[in-house]
Amino acid sequence: MTNSEHTWPKLFRRLSLTGTSRKERPKHASHGPLLPTRPTQHLYQPQDITPEQSRPSTSAGGGSGDIDDITFLIQEQQRLFDQVEENRRSSTFTSIPEPSKDSGSSHAEAKPPTSDRIAEFRLDIPDGVRNMTQHPGNLIVGSVVITVTRSTKAQRISLHFLGHQKVYLKDPASQSPIAPAVGSEYRLFDKKLILWGDKDALDSADVLVPGTLTIPFSIQLPFVNYPSSIRRDSVCKVKYMLWAELERPGMFKDRVTRTHREEIYMEPFAYPTRPRDKHSFALVVPSPNEASSSMAGVAVSLEGCVWPMPAVAGECINYRVSSHVVLQSPSVYTAESTKYFVKNARAIVVERLDVRGLIKGVEYAQSYRSDVFSMALAHDNDKTGSQSSNVNNNNGTYMSSGRLKLPLDLCPFEGKQLSRRYELRLEFDVVDSRSLLDKVIRHSSTYVHWVALDICTVSPDNFQPEALQNAFADESLNILSIAPPPYFVDPSDPELEIGGWELDRNFVKWDKSNPTWIALARKKNSN
Protein backbone atom coordinates (compact mmCIF):
# COMPACT_ATOMS: atom_id res chain seq x y z
CA MET A 1 0.00 0.00 0.00
CA THR A 2 1.64 3.24 -1.17
CA ASN A 3 0.21 6.60 0.00
CA SER A 4 1.79 10.01 0.31
CA GLU A 5 2.98 10.72 3.83
CA HIS A 6 1.17 14.04 3.82
CA THR A 7 -2.23 12.35 3.52
CA TRP A 8 -1.84 10.45 6.80
CA PRO A 9 -3.05 11.92 10.16
CA LYS A 10 -0.41 13.31 12.51
CA LEU A 11 -0.41 10.25 14.74
CA PHE A 12 0.27 7.91 11.79
CA ARG A 13 2.60 10.36 10.05
CA ARG A 14 4.96 10.30 13.07
CA LEU A 15 5.48 6.54 12.48
CA SER A 16 6.26 6.99 8.81
CA LEU A 17 8.82 9.74 9.54
CA THR A 18 10.78 7.63 12.06
CA GLY A 19 11.13 4.73 9.62
CA THR A 20 11.48 2.19 12.41
CA SER A 21 9.25 -0.63 13.52
CA ARG A 22 8.09 -1.49 16.99
CA LYS A 23 11.01 -3.89 17.49
CA GLU A 24 13.68 -1.30 16.64
CA ARG A 25 12.28 1.46 18.96
CA PRO A 26 13.15 1.67 22.64
CA LYS A 27 10.70 0.24 25.13
CA HIS A 28 9.81 3.65 26.63
CA ALA A 29 9.96 5.75 23.46
CA SER A 30 8.00 9.02 23.50
CA HIS A 31 4.82 9.22 21.44
CA GLY A 32 4.36 12.99 21.37
CA PRO A 33 2.76 15.34 23.92
CA LEU A 34 0.03 14.18 26.26
CA LEU A 35 -3.55 14.87 25.28
CA PRO A 36 -5.62 17.26 27.46
CA THR A 37 -7.33 15.84 30.52
CA ARG A 38 -10.91 14.66 30.35
CA PRO A 39 -13.65 15.27 32.90
CA THR A 40 -14.18 12.63 35.54
CA GLN A 41 -16.00 9.62 34.09
CA HIS A 42 -15.85 5.85 34.04
CA LEU A 43 -13.51 5.00 31.21
CA TYR A 44 -12.97 1.61 29.56
CA GLN A 45 -10.14 -0.24 31.34
CA PRO A 46 -8.24 -2.64 29.01
CA GLN A 47 -6.73 -5.81 30.41
CA ASP A 48 -3.07 -5.80 31.40
CA ILE A 49 -0.83 -7.59 28.91
CA THR A 50 2.78 -8.62 29.11
CA PRO A 51 5.44 -7.13 26.82
CA GLU A 52 5.62 -10.42 24.97
CA GLN A 53 1.84 -10.35 24.35
CA SER A 54 1.97 -6.74 23.28
CA ARG A 55 4.47 -7.34 20.56
CA PRO A 56 2.83 -7.03 17.16
CA SER A 57 2.81 -10.16 15.13
CA THR A 58 4.62 -9.98 11.83
CA SER A 59 3.26 -11.49 8.71
CA ALA A 60 4.14 -11.51 5.08
CA GLY A 61 1.89 -8.51 4.35
CA GLY A 62 3.26 -5.06 5.33
CA GLY A 63 -0.22 -3.68 6.20
CA SER A 64 -0.67 -6.08 9.13
CA GLY A 65 2.34 -4.60 10.99
CA ASP A 66 1.04 -1.06 10.66
CA ILE A 67 -2.33 -2.04 12.10
CA ASP A 68 -0.66 -3.66 15.09
CA ASP A 69 1.36 -0.49 15.72
CA ILE A 70 -1.80 1.60 15.65
CA THR A 71 -3.52 -0.71 18.17
CA PHE A 72 -0.53 -0.47 20.51
CA LEU A 73 -0.54 3.33 20.33
CA ILE A 74 -4.23 3.50 21.18
CA GLN A 75 -3.72 1.28 24.22
CA GLU A 76 -0.70 3.31 25.32
CA GLN A 77 -2.66 6.59 25.06
CA GLN A 78 -5.50 5.07 27.05
CA ARG A 79 -3.09 4.08 29.81
CA LEU A 80 -1.68 7.62 29.92
CA PHE A 81 -5.22 9.04 30.12
CA ASP A 82 -6.02 6.91 33.13
CA GLN A 83 -2.79 7.85 34.88
CA VAL A 84 -3.28 11.60 34.40
CA GLU A 85 -6.90 11.45 35.55
CA GLU A 86 -5.93 9.53 38.69
CA ASN A 87 -3.25 12.09 39.52
CA ARG A 88 -5.69 14.95 39.02
CA ARG A 89 -8.30 13.40 41.33
CA SER A 90 -5.78 12.75 44.04
CA SER A 91 -4.37 16.30 43.92
CA THR A 92 -7.78 18.03 44.00
CA PHE A 93 -8.30 17.42 47.73
CA THR A 94 -4.72 17.80 48.88
CA SER A 95 -3.40 20.94 47.14
CA ILE A 96 -5.74 23.56 48.76
CA PRO A 97 -4.00 25.29 51.69
CA GLU A 98 -5.94 25.36 54.94
CA PRO A 99 -6.70 28.78 56.52
CA SER A 100 -4.37 29.80 59.30
CA LYS A 101 -5.75 29.66 62.81
CA ASP A 102 -4.46 33.08 63.85
CA SER A 103 -5.85 35.02 60.88
CA GLY A 104 -9.49 34.12 61.51
CA SER A 105 -10.44 34.73 57.85
CA SER A 106 -10.58 32.57 54.75
CA HIS A 107 -8.21 32.68 51.80
CA ALA A 108 -10.89 34.37 49.63
CA GLU A 109 -11.18 37.34 52.02
CA ALA A 110 -7.51 38.20 51.53
CA LYS A 111 -8.34 39.64 48.10
CA PRO A 112 -9.75 43.21 47.94
CA PRO A 113 -13.55 43.10 47.47
CA THR A 114 -13.45 45.92 44.89
CA SER A 115 -11.11 47.21 42.22
CA ASP A 116 -12.41 50.79 42.27
CA ARG A 117 -9.97 53.48 43.25
CA ILE A 118 -12.60 55.28 45.36
CA ALA A 119 -14.54 52.58 47.19
CA GLU A 120 -16.60 54.96 49.34
CA PHE A 121 -17.32 58.68 49.49
CA ARG A 122 -20.34 59.80 51.50
CA LEU A 123 -21.78 62.06 54.18
CA ASP A 124 -22.45 60.43 57.54
CA ILE A 125 -25.09 62.44 59.43
CA PRO A 126 -26.63 61.04 62.64
CA ASP A 127 -30.29 60.09 62.40
CA GLY A 128 -31.16 62.49 65.21
CA VAL A 129 -29.94 65.34 63.00
CA ARG A 130 -31.14 64.09 59.62
CA ASN A 131 -34.70 63.34 60.75
CA MET A 132 -35.19 66.47 62.88
CA THR A 133 -36.33 69.91 61.73
CA GLN A 134 -33.64 72.52 62.36
CA HIS A 135 -34.37 75.93 63.89
CA PRO A 136 -32.31 79.12 64.22
CA GLY A 137 -29.38 78.59 66.60
CA ASN A 138 -29.22 74.79 66.22
CA LEU A 139 -25.99 72.85 65.68
CA ILE A 140 -25.78 70.44 62.71
CA VAL A 141 -23.07 67.77 63.07
CA GLY A 142 -21.79 65.03 60.78
CA SER A 143 -18.70 63.64 59.07
CA VAL A 144 -17.28 63.01 55.61
CA VAL A 145 -16.10 59.43 55.00
CA ILE A 146 -13.83 58.55 52.05
CA THR A 147 -12.17 55.19 51.31
CA VAL A 148 -9.49 54.80 48.61
CA THR A 149 -7.97 51.45 47.65
CA ARG A 150 -4.83 52.88 46.01
CA SER A 151 -2.67 55.93 46.49
CA THR A 152 -4.67 58.75 44.90
CA LYS A 153 -3.63 62.25 44.02
CA ALA A 154 -6.18 64.80 45.19
CA GLN A 155 -6.28 68.55 45.55
CA ARG A 156 -8.88 69.00 48.28
CA ILE A 157 -11.99 67.70 50.02
CA SER A 158 -14.57 70.42 50.65
CA LEU A 159 -17.97 70.74 52.35
CA HIS A 160 -20.78 72.83 50.82
CA PHE A 161 -23.95 74.21 52.45
CA LEU A 162 -26.41 75.99 50.14
CA GLY A 163 -29.71 77.74 50.82
CA HIS A 164 -31.66 78.17 47.58
CA GLN A 165 -35.03 79.80 46.93
CA LYS A 166 -37.02 79.93 43.69
CA VAL A 167 -40.44 81.41 43.00
CA TYR A 168 -42.64 81.25 39.89
CA LEU A 169 -44.74 84.12 38.56
CA LYS A 170 -47.25 84.25 35.74
CA ASP A 171 -46.74 86.93 33.16
CA PRO A 172 -49.82 89.21 33.25
CA ALA A 173 -49.09 90.41 29.70
CA SER A 174 -49.39 86.88 28.30
CA GLN A 175 -52.76 86.13 26.70
CA SER A 176 -52.25 82.37 26.51
CA PRO A 177 -53.91 80.34 29.28
CA ILE A 178 -51.10 77.77 29.13
CA ALA A 179 -48.22 80.24 29.21
CA PRO A 180 -45.33 78.89 31.33
CA ALA A 181 -44.51 80.58 34.61
CA VAL A 182 -41.34 82.66 34.89
CA GLY A 183 -38.90 81.48 37.57
CA SER A 184 -36.95 83.87 39.77
CA GLU A 185 -34.07 82.46 41.86
CA TYR A 186 -32.41 83.81 44.98
CA ARG A 187 -29.54 82.41 47.07
CA LEU A 188 -30.02 82.74 50.78
CA PHE A 189 -26.41 81.67 51.48
CA ASP A 190 -23.63 79.59 49.90
CA LYS A 191 -20.92 78.42 52.33
CA LYS A 192 -17.81 76.29 51.64
CA LEU A 193 -15.27 74.70 54.02
CA ILE A 194 -12.00 72.94 53.05
CA LEU A 195 -11.75 69.72 55.07
CA TRP A 196 -8.54 68.32 53.52
CA GLY A 197 -5.91 69.76 51.18
CA ASP A 198 -4.77 73.27 50.31
CA LYS A 199 -7.48 75.72 49.31
CA ASP A 200 -5.04 78.03 47.51
CA ALA A 201 -3.16 75.35 45.53
CA LEU A 202 -4.22 75.17 41.89
CA ASP A 203 -1.65 72.87 40.25
CA SER A 204 -0.22 70.96 43.19
CA ALA A 205 -1.89 67.89 44.68
CA ASP A 206 -1.42 65.77 47.78
CA VAL A 207 -1.75 61.99 48.03
CA LEU A 208 -4.53 60.10 49.78
CA VAL A 209 -3.10 56.96 51.41
CA PRO A 210 -5.10 53.72 50.88
CA GLY A 211 -7.58 53.48 53.73
CA THR A 212 -10.69 55.09 55.23
CA LEU A 213 -10.47 58.73 56.29
CA THR A 214 -13.20 60.20 58.54
CA ILE A 215 -13.36 63.99 58.92
CA PRO A 216 -15.98 65.38 61.36
CA PHE A 217 -17.64 68.77 60.84
CA SER A 218 -20.24 71.00 62.50
CA ILE A 219 -22.50 73.80 61.25
CA GLN A 220 -23.72 76.51 63.61
CA LEU A 221 -26.97 78.06 62.39
CA PRO A 222 -27.38 81.77 63.17
CA PHE A 223 -30.38 83.28 64.94
CA VAL A 224 -31.90 84.29 61.60
CA ASN A 225 -35.34 83.32 60.38
CA TYR A 226 -34.64 81.90 56.95
CA PRO A 227 -37.71 80.77 54.96
CA SER A 228 -39.09 77.38 55.82
CA SER A 229 -38.27 74.35 53.68
CA ILE A 230 -41.16 74.19 51.27
CA ARG A 231 -42.02 72.91 47.81
CA ARG A 232 -45.20 73.84 45.96
CA ASP A 233 -45.42 72.88 42.30
CA SER A 234 -45.43 75.89 39.96
CA VAL A 235 -45.42 78.27 42.96
CA CYS A 236 -42.20 78.16 44.99
CA LYS A 237 -39.35 75.98 46.21
CA VAL A 238 -36.99 76.51 49.18
CA LYS A 239 -34.26 73.92 49.80
CA TYR A 240 -31.21 73.67 52.06
CA MET A 241 -28.65 71.22 50.66
CA LEU A 242 -25.46 69.81 52.19
CA TRP A 243 -22.83 67.80 50.26
CA ALA A 244 -19.07 67.16 49.95
CA GLU A 245 -16.76 67.31 46.92
CA LEU A 246 -13.46 65.57 46.10
CA GLU A 247 -11.30 67.41 43.55
CA ARG A 248 -8.64 65.44 41.66
CA PRO A 249 -6.27 66.68 38.94
CA GLY A 250 -7.08 65.64 35.39
CA MET A 251 -5.43 65.87 32.00
CA PHE A 252 -7.53 68.74 30.67
CA LYS A 253 -9.61 69.75 33.69
CA ASP A 254 -10.05 68.77 37.31
CA ARG A 255 -12.28 65.82 38.09
CA VAL A 256 -14.88 66.47 40.77
CA THR A 257 -16.65 63.67 42.68
CA ARG A 258 -19.68 64.63 44.76
CA THR A 259 -21.53 62.82 47.51
CA HIS A 260 -25.29 62.46 47.68
CA ARG A 261 -26.93 65.77 48.54
CA GLU A 262 -28.53 65.70 51.96
CA GLU A 263 -31.54 67.97 52.40
CA ILE A 264 -31.67 69.82 55.71
CA TYR A 265 -35.22 70.75 56.77
CA MET A 266 -35.39 74.12 58.45
CA GLU A 267 -38.18 76.16 60.03
CA PRO A 268 -38.00 79.66 61.46
CA PHE A 269 -39.31 80.92 64.77
CA ALA A 270 -42.65 82.73 64.42
CA TYR A 271 -42.73 85.27 67.25
CA PRO A 272 -45.95 87.02 68.35
CA THR A 273 -46.34 90.65 67.38
CA ARG A 274 -49.08 91.58 69.89
CA PRO A 275 -50.68 90.32 73.10
CA ARG A 276 -53.50 87.82 72.96
CA ASP A 277 -57.05 89.10 72.52
CA LYS A 278 -60.35 88.27 70.81
CA HIS A 279 -60.90 88.86 67.11
CA SER A 280 -64.54 89.91 66.47
CA PHE A 281 -66.34 90.59 63.19
CA ALA A 282 -69.80 91.82 62.16
CA LEU A 283 -70.60 92.39 58.49
CA VAL A 284 -72.94 91.61 55.62
CA VAL A 285 -71.62 89.26 52.95
CA PRO A 286 -73.06 90.17 49.52
CA SER A 287 -74.14 87.59 46.99
CA PRO A 288 -71.25 86.05 45.04
CA ASN A 289 -70.83 86.72 41.36
CA GLU A 290 -71.60 83.13 40.40
CA ALA A 291 -75.01 83.22 42.15
CA SER A 292 -78.10 82.62 40.08
CA SER A 293 -80.31 85.50 38.97
CA SER A 294 -82.97 84.56 41.52
CA MET A 295 -80.45 84.97 44.37
CA ALA A 296 -78.80 88.13 43.10
CA GLY A 297 -80.40 90.23 45.88
CA VAL A 298 -79.77 87.77 48.72
CA ALA A 299 -77.03 88.50 51.29
CA VAL A 300 -75.90 86.97 54.59
CA SER A 301 -75.58 88.93 57.81
CA LEU A 302 -72.66 87.50 59.80
CA GLU A 303 -71.53 88.05 63.38
CA GLY A 304 -68.97 86.18 65.42
CA CYS A 305 -65.53 86.05 66.99
CA VAL A 306 -62.41 83.90 67.09
CA TRP A 307 -60.14 83.73 70.14
CA PRO A 308 -57.43 83.67 71.38
CA MET A 309 -55.31 85.48 68.81
CA PRO A 310 -52.35 85.12 68.19
CA ALA A 311 -52.66 81.35 68.30
CA VAL A 312 -49.87 78.78 68.59
CA ALA A 313 -49.67 76.03 65.96
CA GLY A 314 -51.09 72.78 67.31
CA GLU A 315 -53.37 74.46 69.86
CA CYS A 316 -57.15 74.89 69.80
CA ILE A 317 -58.98 78.13 69.09
CA ASN A 318 -62.57 78.97 70.00
CA TYR A 319 -65.13 80.27 67.54
CA ARG A 320 -68.71 81.53 67.62
CA VAL A 321 -70.69 82.53 64.50
CA SER A 322 -74.27 83.59 63.89
CA SER A 323 -75.67 84.10 60.38
CA HIS A 324 -79.01 84.75 58.73
CA VAL A 325 -80.22 85.74 55.28
CA VAL A 326 -81.21 89.34 54.41
CA LEU A 327 -82.48 90.96 51.22
CA GLN A 328 -80.28 93.42 49.37
CA SER A 329 -81.67 96.66 47.90
CA PRO A 330 -79.72 99.16 45.78
CA SER A 331 -78.70 101.18 48.86
CA VAL A 332 -79.40 99.26 52.09
CA TYR A 333 -80.20 95.76 53.32
CA THR A 334 -83.88 95.39 54.14
CA ALA A 335 -85.77 92.97 56.37
CA GLU A 336 -84.89 89.32 56.76
CA SER A 337 -85.92 86.93 54.04
CA THR A 338 -87.93 83.82 54.85
CA LYS A 339 -87.56 82.42 51.35
CA TYR A 340 -83.91 81.42 51.83
CA PHE A 341 -81.98 80.16 54.83
CA VAL A 342 -78.42 79.04 55.77
CA LYS A 343 -78.27 75.26 55.60
CA ASN A 344 -74.57 74.40 56.27
CA ALA A 345 -71.41 76.14 57.41
CA ARG A 346 -67.72 75.20 57.16
CA ALA A 347 -64.36 76.51 58.41
CA ILE A 348 -61.22 75.97 56.28
CA VAL A 349 -57.64 76.82 57.26
CA VAL A 350 -55.93 78.21 54.14
CA GLU A 351 -52.24 78.65 53.37
CA ARG A 352 -51.46 81.90 51.53
CA LEU A 353 -48.14 82.31 49.67
CA ASP A 354 -47.13 85.80 48.50
CA VAL A 355 -44.37 85.76 45.87
CA ARG A 356 -42.49 88.71 44.44
CA GLY A 357 -40.13 88.87 41.48
CA LEU A 358 -39.14 90.53 38.22
CA ILE A 359 -40.66 89.77 34.84
CA LYS A 360 -38.94 91.60 31.95
CA GLY A 361 -37.58 94.18 34.35
CA VAL A 362 -40.94 94.88 36.01
CA GLU A 363 -41.60 93.78 39.62
CA TYR A 364 -44.79 91.83 40.27
CA ALA A 365 -46.44 90.43 43.39
CA GLN A 366 -48.83 87.48 43.22
CA SER A 367 -50.66 85.34 45.77
CA TYR A 368 -51.52 81.65 45.82
CA ARG A 369 -53.94 79.92 48.20
CA SER A 370 -54.31 76.25 49.11
CA ASP A 371 -56.51 74.49 51.68
CA VAL A 372 -54.75 72.93 54.67
CA PHE A 373 -57.56 71.76 56.95
CA SER A 374 -61.37 71.90 56.92
CA MET A 375 -64.09 71.25 59.47
CA ALA A 376 -67.89 71.38 59.33
CA LEU A 377 -69.49 73.86 61.73
CA ALA A 378 -72.41 71.96 63.20
CA HIS A 379 -75.51 73.81 64.33
CA ASP A 380 -75.72 74.26 68.09
CA ASN A 381 -79.05 72.42 68.21
CA ASP A 382 -77.49 69.43 66.44
CA LYS A 383 -74.90 69.15 69.22
CA THR A 384 -77.53 69.05 71.99
CA GLY A 385 -79.77 66.67 70.05
CA SER A 386 -82.96 68.36 71.28
CA GLN A 387 -84.19 69.54 67.91
CA SER A 388 -83.00 69.42 64.33
CA SER A 389 -81.35 72.34 62.69
CA ASN A 390 -84.04 72.56 60.01
CA VAL A 391 -86.76 73.10 62.61
CA ASN A 392 -84.79 75.68 64.58
CA ASN A 393 -83.73 77.31 61.37
CA ASN A 394 -87.22 78.47 60.55
CA ASN A 395 -86.33 81.91 61.86
CA GLY A 396 -83.43 82.00 59.39
CA THR A 397 -80.61 82.07 61.97
CA TYR A 398 -77.73 79.59 61.87
CA MET A 399 -75.66 79.56 65.08
CA SER A 400 -72.57 77.48 65.73
CA SER A 401 -69.84 77.53 68.37
CA GLY A 402 -67.03 75.22 69.40
CA ARG A 403 -63.30 74.64 69.18
CA LEU A 404 -61.03 74.23 66.17
CA LYS A 405 -57.69 72.44 66.53
CA LEU A 406 -54.96 73.97 64.38
CA PRO A 407 -52.49 71.71 62.53
CA LEU A 408 -49.09 71.35 64.15
CA ASP A 409 -47.03 72.12 61.03
CA LEU A 410 -48.25 75.70 60.56
CA CYS A 411 -45.22 78.02 60.32
CA PRO A 412 -45.53 81.53 58.85
CA PHE A 413 -42.47 83.46 57.71
CA GLU A 414 -41.49 86.68 55.96
CA GLY A 415 -38.85 86.77 53.22
CA LYS A 416 -37.51 88.99 50.50
CA GLN A 417 -39.20 87.08 47.69
CA LEU A 418 -41.54 84.73 49.53
CA SER A 419 -43.92 85.07 52.47
CA ARG A 420 -46.35 82.60 54.01
CA ARG A 421 -49.44 83.44 56.03
CA TYR A 422 -52.62 81.67 57.10
CA GLU A 423 -56.29 82.57 56.83
CA LEU A 424 -59.59 81.14 58.02
CA ARG A 425 -62.26 80.86 55.33
CA LEU A 426 -65.86 80.67 56.57
CA GLU A 427 -68.33 79.26 54.04
CA PHE A 428 -72.14 79.36 54.34
CA ASP A 429 -74.49 77.46 52.01
CA VAL A 430 -77.74 79.37 51.37
CA VAL A 431 -80.58 77.34 49.85
CA ASP A 432 -84.20 77.86 48.81
CA SER A 433 -86.67 77.14 51.62
CA ARG A 434 -89.22 75.80 49.13
CA SER A 435 -87.15 72.66 48.47
CA LEU A 436 -89.27 69.52 48.38
CA LEU A 437 -88.79 67.45 51.57
CA ASP A 438 -85.31 68.85 51.88
CA LYS A 439 -84.19 66.47 49.11
CA VAL A 440 -84.31 68.61 45.98
CA ILE A 441 -82.71 72.06 46.22
CA ARG A 442 -83.98 74.53 43.67
CA HIS A 443 -81.49 77.32 44.24
CA SER A 444 -78.27 77.42 46.30
CA SER A 445 -75.15 79.54 46.63
CA THR A 446 -72.04 79.67 48.87
CA TYR A 447 -71.09 82.84 50.74
CA VAL A 448 -67.50 83.29 51.90
CA HIS A 449 -65.84 85.42 54.58
CA TRP A 450 -62.08 85.57 55.24
CA VAL A 451 -60.56 85.90 58.72
CA ALA A 452 -56.82 86.50 59.13
CA LEU A 453 -55.15 83.93 61.40
CA ASP A 454 -52.26 85.22 63.48
CA ILE A 455 -50.18 82.06 63.92
CA CYS A 456 -46.93 81.85 65.89
CA THR A 457 -44.62 79.10 67.09
CA VAL A 458 -43.52 80.91 70.28
CA SER A 459 -46.17 81.29 72.96
CA PRO A 460 -47.35 84.91 73.36
CA ASP A 461 -48.15 84.45 77.06
CA ASN A 462 -44.97 86.30 78.10
CA PHE A 463 -45.12 88.90 75.34
CA GLN A 464 -43.30 92.18 76.03
CA PRO A 465 -44.30 95.12 73.82
CA GLU A 466 -41.12 97.00 74.76
CA ALA A 467 -38.93 94.22 73.37
CA LEU A 468 -40.79 94.32 70.07
CA GLN A 469 -40.36 98.09 69.75
CA ASN A 470 -36.63 97.84 70.44
CA ALA A 471 -36.24 95.07 67.84
CA PHE A 472 -37.53 97.26 65.01
CA ALA A 473 -35.98 100.54 66.19
CA ASP A 474 -33.12 100.31 63.66
CA GLU A 475 -34.51 99.67 60.18
CA SER A 476 -31.03 99.17 58.67
CA LEU A 477 -30.53 96.02 60.74
CA ASN A 478 -33.85 94.57 59.57
CA ILE A 479 -33.40 95.19 55.84
CA LEU A 480 -33.83 91.52 54.89
CA SER A 481 -37.08 91.17 56.86
CA ILE A 482 -35.89 87.85 58.28
CA ALA A 483 -34.80 88.92 61.75
CA PRO A 484 -36.91 87.28 64.50
CA PRO A 485 -38.49 89.76 66.92
CA PRO A 486 -38.27 90.36 69.79
CA TYR A 487 -34.81 88.72 70.14
CA PHE A 488 -33.00 90.45 67.31
CA VAL A 489 -29.40 89.83 66.19
CA ASP A 490 -27.44 90.94 63.14
CA PRO A 491 -28.17 88.81 60.05
CA SER A 492 -25.32 86.38 59.36
CA ASP A 493 -24.55 83.18 57.47
CA PRO A 494 -24.10 79.69 58.94
CA GLU A 495 -20.62 78.96 60.33
CA LEU A 496 -18.89 75.77 59.12
CA GLU A 497 -16.13 74.23 61.25
CA ILE A 498 -13.97 71.09 61.27
CA GLY A 499 -14.81 69.01 64.36
CA GLY A 500 -16.98 70.78 66.89
CA TRP A 501 -18.43 67.62 68.49
CA GLU A 502 -17.35 64.40 70.17
CA LEU A 503 -16.29 62.60 66.94
CA ASP A 504 -12.53 62.83 66.24
CA ARG A 505 -10.61 62.63 62.99
CA ASN A 506 -9.86 58.97 62.24
CA PHE A 507 -7.93 56.89 59.67
CA VAL A 508 -8.07 53.09 59.11
CA LYS A 509 -5.68 51.47 56.62
CA TRP A 510 -7.00 49.44 53.70
CA ASP A 511 -6.86 45.76 54.68
CA LYS A 512 -9.22 42.94 55.61
CA SER A 513 -9.87 44.50 59.04
CA ASN A 514 -11.18 47.75 57.48
CA PRO A 515 -14.96 48.19 58.08
CA THR A 516 -15.54 49.20 54.45
CA TRP A 517 -13.58 46.13 53.28
CA ILE A 518 -15.74 43.86 55.45
CA ALA A 519 -19.01 45.50 54.32
CA LEU A 520 -18.11 45.23 50.62
CA ALA A 521 -16.96 41.61 51.04
CA ARG A 522 -20.25 40.63 52.70
CA LYS A 523 -22.23 42.36 49.99
CA LYS A 524 -20.19 40.62 47.30
CA ASN A 525 -20.61 37.18 48.89
CA SER A 526 -24.35 37.68 49.40
CA ASN A 527 -24.80 38.39 45.70
Image (tube, grey):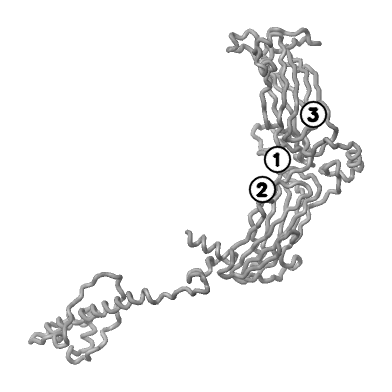
Q: Residue at x 80, y 21 (%)?
A: 281
Q: Residue at x 72, y 26 (%)?
A: 403
Marks 2 and 1, the one that precedes in the sequence: 2
Which numbered circle lies on residue 131? 2
The disc placed on residue 35 is none
Q: Residues within 10 Å of mark 2 (few under 14, many from 20)?
A: few
Q: Amino acid at mark 3?
A: Pro
What numbered label is drawn on residue 236? 1
**Screen quadrant of the N terminus:** bottom left
Pointer 3 residue: 308
Q: Secondary structure at mark 1?
A: strand
Specify few, some or many for label 3: CA neighbours under 10 Å numbering under 14, 14-19, or 20 or more.
some
Res. 404 image quadrant: top right
- Counting residues from the N terminus, which is met first, the one under dot 2 or under dot 3? 2
In whole angstroms, how far apart are the C-alphas of marks 2 and 3?
A: 32 Å
Q: Residue furthest left?
A: 60
Is 88 situated above or below 18?
above
Image location of residue 268, percent across then percent down: 77, 43
